[in-house]
Amino acid sequence: MGFFCPFFFSFSALQVSRALSVSPASAFTSVSAKMAALLPFSVPNNNNPESNPFVSSGRTQFGSVRISCSTAKMGKIDDTHLRLVNSVKTNATFRLNASRESMESLLNLKMSGKESLTETGYEKELFDEMKHRFLNFKRLRYLQQLDHFQKLANIQEPKFMIVSCADSRVCPSNILGFQPGEAFVVRNVANLVPPFENEPSETSAALEFAVNSLKVQNLLVTGHSRCGGIRALMSMEDEGDSSSFINKWVAIGKNARSITKTAASNLGFDRQCRHCEKESVNQSLMNLLTYPWIKEKVIKGSLFIHGGYYDFVNCTYEKWTLDFKESDVEEGGGCTIKDKECWM
């Protein structure tokens, strides 16, 4: 749609009202019905969540835990579609040149009594709120810490790189309190880290930049409760849908799913998903070690690998650290985790 002129829109509505012998307000509603409508994005929902955030078995209990070293394949993310219902056409004299068909369509819409949804007012409210938040940030934080932000404008030296889920409920900066400049963050569906031998991805590129250029000291992969990506992983067939972006992407976690199916076979599906949410974090930690420049720094002790799990139902956070011993990995024994804590 081209440039939108409020004057044109109101003037056209008046002309339509005269042509149809209806009120300008009704004609305005009719014309509004032809505007674009935004389809909402579906968010996975767990209908029967487990209330206990620590129900788990096998590989995710507190204490020393062995982590398998195997890897899996890549996949994709499903599309969110934006549909344009119609557009308003104008000419230089701001006249509405409606064809007989379009006039009949408007009349039928009026007669049906159905209310239309215009996005213009709602969008304005959203961006007005966003503007208010930005100006508050500028006034209360940026201007109050001007020296800090001016330093950040020249260089960033984050101590952490975070791999987190794209889920709107688990923003790591909000949950863990990272301030600008403290954490380099990449987010994807189900917070997965693909192994080094997979095709390039934005996660692999972010890892390379964070470790080799920014010299971060800590890598933190953080999972979360009621993860839609993990539910998709646990629900998919072994072959999966080759046309699904989601299935191809979450296939990276197939080993975590296999481990979960074995270790938690006696549990219901929801509790298996909770188990896999944590197991997939451990598998991603092991996948990090397949990157030669990450493994080299871990061996030298200049880089540390951590896992985390945020339960937003009960607002708790579990944190653990990979206890890397190269001899264990070479012998196929995997790694252990240490320093496990639960913040509640």
Image (cartoon, rainbow, N blue to C red):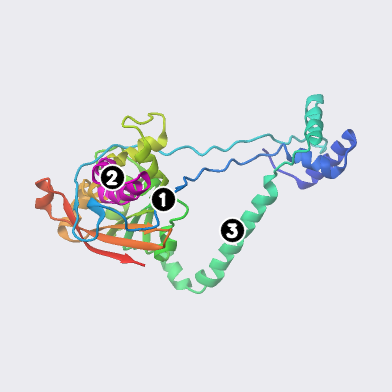
Q: Nearer the viewer, residue 146 or 102?
A: 102
On the question of residue 156 being in view, the answer is: no
Looking at the image, residue 303 lies above or below residue 44: below
Magenta region: 255-284
- Check if mark 3's residue and mark 1's residue have beta carbons within 8 Å: no
Q: Nearer the viewer, residue 120 or 92?
A: 120
Quadrant location, the N terminus:
top right
Q: Was residue 238 drawn as part of the magenta stretch in this picture? A: no
Quadrant location, the C terminus:
bottom left
Q: Amino acid at mark 1?
A: Arg
Residue at point 75% right, 45% down? Answer: 5
Please rate how many residues cluster around mark 1, counting C-alpha atoms within 10 Å: few if below 14, some from 14 to 19, many from 20.
many
The residue carrying mark 2 is 266
Q: Is residue 44 left or right of residue 281?
A: right
Of circles 3 and 1, the one toward us is 1
Of circles 3 and 2, the one toward us is 2
The residue carrying mark 3 is 130
On the question of residue 101 being in view, the answer is: yes
Q: Amino acid at mark 2?
A: Asn
Q: Amino acid at mark 3?
A: Met
Image location of residue 241, percent across then percent down:
38, 30
The Cα atoms of the two marked residues, 2 and 1, are separated by 20 Å
Please rate how many residues cluster around mark 2, counting C-alpha atoms within 10 Å: few if below 14, some from 14 to 19, many from 20.
few
Looking at the image, residue 227 lies above or below residue 95: below
Residue at point 29% right, 53% down? Answer: 56
The residue carrying mark 1 is 226
* Mark 3 secondary-structure assignment: helix
- Residue sticking out furthest to the front: 266
